[in-house]
Amino acid sequence: MATYKEIKGTEIEVLASDPSNPVEGQVWYNSTSNVLKGVAATTAGAWATGGALNQGRIGAQNGAGTQTAGLVYGGLVETTGTYLNQTEAYNGTSWTELNNLNTARNSGAAGGTQTSALLAGGSGPTAASESWNGTNWTNTPSLNTARQYLTGAMESGTAGIAFGGMPPPAGIANTELYNGSNWTEVNDLNTTRRSVAGVGSSTAGFCMGGYGPPGAVGNCESWNGTNWTEVNDQINVGGGAAFGTLASAVKVGDNSVGNRTELWNGTNWSAGTNASVAVSNRYGVGTSSLGLLAAGEPPNAGVTSVEEYVGPGVAVTRTFTDS
């Protein structure tokens, strides 16, 4: 029988801590935790518990950044009607409190990176807009249309689009483009709606589901920088949280099940591995390979729970047991 060294060309290393960048197929013994570990590829998407937020909250908007460099801001404690201005940053393990928003709010259009993010509109409704430079929030020009329960596709604190929202209760189709100086009205969504999920950028945006005049909808639309185009519908209707891009996205939650997961490959939707916690109104952060969900409800006070997502085929570290 061939040995591990004969197959892989290396021996099983004994390490005091896990390697920072292990490769698929690598195996090592962690002498601190006294366990054998290795790296394998997931055959399906998988969820794991992440570090808890410091402040429980209802999200109802995107976060910014990546799974290991994430940012969430604002939120709501519905039991007291308190809108939040807290900002928290994630390093892949724990959350750190940073400087607050200028305007406490929930359900705005958000996105960007951990060091360059944007928030526009939100509860009130308000037209207020703010940008984040990694240290502070700065008030920026307001949206042309005040609204809440909108979403956005933003690549930074100086570029993005905001779309959908309410009032009126049935939703609106308005889309606005930000160039770092002003918000400009551009072509509307094809389907009027609110409480939509959105990912992408100002030149490649993606609008998913939500609630329109007839109720929950499954319509999805892509944005090319000028126009919205109808693409294939979600499997299930309603809003939810999302992360990824126009070419590859993950959406979690719908009109009836808070943790139901769907995967978008740029053309079609397929069912994914359901998230562990069945709550709604969460922040979505990251990519379709490495994503993150934070906060949500019930209860109406909001939760601190965080879930980390690893997409199909992504290399993950496994601990071997004798069972």
Image (tube, grey):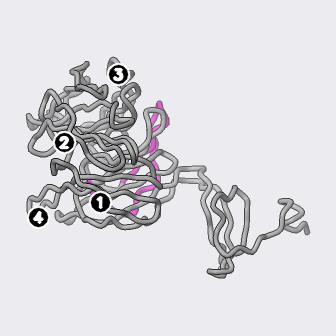
Identify the magenta region.
Answer: 260-281
Find the distance from the CA under tag 3 to the CA under tag 1.
31 Å
Q: Amino acid at mark 3?
A: Thr
Quadrant showing the C terminus: bottom right
From the top left corner, tell me how far across and down residue 16 is, in percent.
67, 76
Residue wearing tag 4: 79
Residue wearing tag 3: 229
Q: Please say if the residues under marks 2 and 4 sit with CB atoms less than 8 Å apart.
A: no
Q: Is residue 209 left or right of residue 20?
A: left
Q: Is residue 151 left or right of residue 39?
A: left
Residue 149's disc is 2
Residue wearing tag 1: 295
* Label whose residue precedes the other's in the sequence (1 or 4): 4
Q: Which residue is depicted at the point 30% across and 47% down?
A: 240
Q: Amino acid at mark 1?
A: Ala
From the top left corner, tell me how far across and down residue 138 is, in percent.
24, 42
Mark 3 or 1, closer to the camera: 1
In this view, the residue in front, 277 or 119, is: 119
Q: Is residue 103 visible?
A: yes
* Label whose residue precedes the other's in the sequence (4 or 3): 4
Find the distance from the CA under tag 2 to the CA under tag 3.
21 Å
Q: Residues within 10 Å of mark 4 (few under 14, many from 20)?
A: few
Find the distance from the CA under tag 4 to the CA under tag 3.
39 Å
Mark 4 or 3, closer to the camera: 4
In magenta stretch: residue 266:
yes
Q: Secondary structure at mark 3?
A: strand
Q: Secondary structure at mark 4?
A: loop
* Label whose residue precedes the other's in the sequence (3 or 1): 3
